[in-house]
Amino acid sequence: VQLQASGGGLVHAGGSLRLSCAASGRTVSSYRMGWFRQAPGKEREFVASINWRGDSTNYADSVKGRFTISRDNAKNTVDLQMNSLKPEDTAVYYCAGRSGTNYNLWGQGTLVTVSS
């Protein structure tokens, strides 16, 4: 399975971006999917996750109320809608999937830069 993230870019503070992660090779409909990010000089951190049915989500406290994760199992995609972006949201964003306890599928990152 390959995960391809897209949608990153440069946006002003307060703006919005929508990231998309497309899976190819096999379906990820049974996987819990998540988004992580890594800012320059910092460790990778959890952002959001969604269960296989799409009816249970988790968010990092820093993005609650601003970011929304969703999935379309028919299209094999997972999206992250990011609103009210802040400079501290600047990072490389990665999508990932897990079938068990740990995330074992990782895509390449997409860069999000939020200017002040």
Image: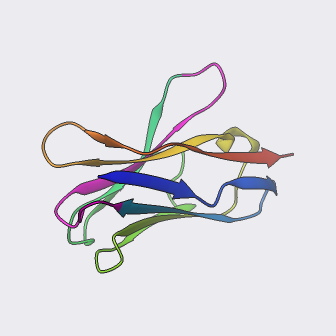
- On whether residue 84 falls in the magenta region, the answer is no
- On whether residue 34 falls in the magenta region, the answer is yes
Quarter where residue 6 is shown: bottom right
- For the image shown, how many numbered marks are present on the structure? 0
Residue drawn at 25 percent across, 39 percent down: 104
Residue drawn at 63 percent across, 61 percent down: 7
Q: Is residue 101 left or right of residue 77?
A: left
Q: Which residues are magenta?
A: 24-42
Q: Position of residue 77 (x, y in %)?
A: 39, 68
Query: Relative to residue 82, is residue 115 depicted above or below?
Result: above
Residue drawn at 70 percent across, 65 percent down: 16
The residue lying toward the viewer, choosing from 68 and 65, is 68
Most distant residue in the left direction: 100
Q: Quadrant of the C terminus?
A: top right
- Camera sees residue 82: no
Most distant residue in the front direction: 25
The residue lying toward the viewer, choosing from 101 and 106, is 106
Q: Position of residue 34 (x, y in %)?
A: 36, 51
Quarter where residue 33 is shown: bottom left
Query: Relative to residue 59, is residue 68 depicted above or below?
Result: below
| Colouring convention used in this rendered image of the protein | rainbow
Quarter where residue 12 is shown: bottom right
The residue lying toward the viewer, choosing from 81 and 110, is 110
- Camera sees residue 58: yes
Residue drawn at 29 percent across, 52 percent down: 1
Most distant residue in the bottom direction: 74
